Amino acid sequence: MISHLKRFTILTRKETEIIDITPSVLETVAASGVWSGTVFVLSLHTTTGFYVNEGLPDLERDMADFLARLVPEDHPYRHARFLHSDGQMAINAPSHLRGTMLGFQAFFPVEEGKLVRGGRQTMYLAELDGPQERTYVVQVTGEARGGEA
Amino acid sequence: MIDFHTHPVMIKELVEADPDFGRAVREVFGLLFPPQPLEILRREMDAAGIERAVILALDLSTAHGCRVPDNETVARLAESEPRLIGFASVDPNLPDAAERLDGAVRRLGLRGLKLDPSLQRFDPGDRSRAYPLYRLAGELGIPVLLHAGMSWAPPGVSRLSRPVLLEEALSDHPGTNFVLAHFGWPWTDEALMLALKHRNLYLDTSVVYARTPAETLRKVVAEHIGLPVLEGSLPDRILFGSNYPRQDMRRAARGIASLGFSPGLLEAITRGNAARLLGLETEARP
């Protein structure tokens, strides 16, 4: 079995930013040598999100606005205190909760060396507490063509 | 906006280049989260609407054997990024502190003096250690920014940063501009009392104690002090500060904007007062 893992590190620009990471996932699958298997995408952060939707700028803005309405900034969250394990104020409860709404990971099948997805499906990393340096992982596992490892 | 209170300590390039610096940031300054690339500081400023930021050196040579960071590092950062305004720090416990300050301003081009009595372990009213620095700062035309109030740093001794300890120094150095950080919380009344009396004293808004900046500032500034007091008595001597990275700039900026200051006072607090104090009004914008 092949296991091909690649880390991508990006610098985000905005507090909330919707980033199309589809090309990096497709490239990783293509480079993996996996003919039949799965691809797993994981954000390594708790104030980001990962989701799949149609790749349109208006929908990206709608998603950002929707998250802000769903989890308002000014609610009296418990997570608004000094965090001794970090040495800083933990005042980003909305970012954590918005991330939880989206989730942090996704699976896709790989068939005949290609990632299987709907024609309108775009993969997004959502920055929810930026700007920050962010890392996500793409792991492709499966068998090579003809079942060879 | 101008952020008058930031610490360039969790910058990845600095931490990775010097393990001792990284250790000092963790153990002395008490910041334990992952550092971020310098570019993220620029982007954080953009996201917060902050045009320029004061970055502070901190010389803890005798008390803790470290500088977080040193004057040379701050000068390099300020030179490479014109949006950053570097403040020097010298250790008042060192016999050549005044010479070091003179060099940091004249040779390195730093534009203020940062002192932290809690971490540097000195009495801000000490006539032999602190007064020569206050006098020189006045001669050099730079402000003196002192930590005031609670020290979140693990070895910090908060009582050394009681605002009232500065009272005589304010009277004795009328030609020197002082800034007390963090509104002096929890001794906000002392800080306010001194600022009402002494026209050479400014207060910065970088209060960090509990809750979000919006909630903290509402309680400490709007409810405890009262906006009319600032509007009437101190409109020219309040400076916006975030205390980044102990608190993020974005939420600090939103917090100060949420208080309901008049537009004129909000502009003064977030830009005008700092620009005047630092002599930026005649400079071309970076």
Image: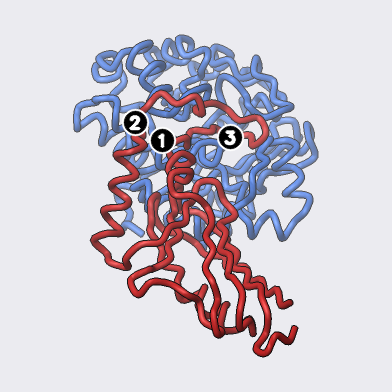
Percent x, y of residue B18: 75, 56
Q: Residue at 41% of width from left, 35% of height from top? A: B252
Chain B appears in which tint?
blue
Q: Residue at 51% of width from left, 74% of height from top? A: A24
Q: Mark 2 near mark 1, Cβ–Cβ under 8 Å?
A: yes
Percent x, y of residue A100: 48, 43
A43 to the left or right of B3? right
- Give the residue type that dot 1 points to: Ala
Give the colour scheme of this rendering.
by chain
Point out which mark residue A88 bears.
3
Q: Mark 1 near mark 3, Cβ–Cβ under 8 Å?
A: no
Closer to us: A108 or B251: A108
For mark 1, give the secondary structure.
helix
Point out which mark residue B256 bears.
2
Asked whether residue B138 is in view, the answer is no
Of badges 3 and 2, nearer the viewer stands 3
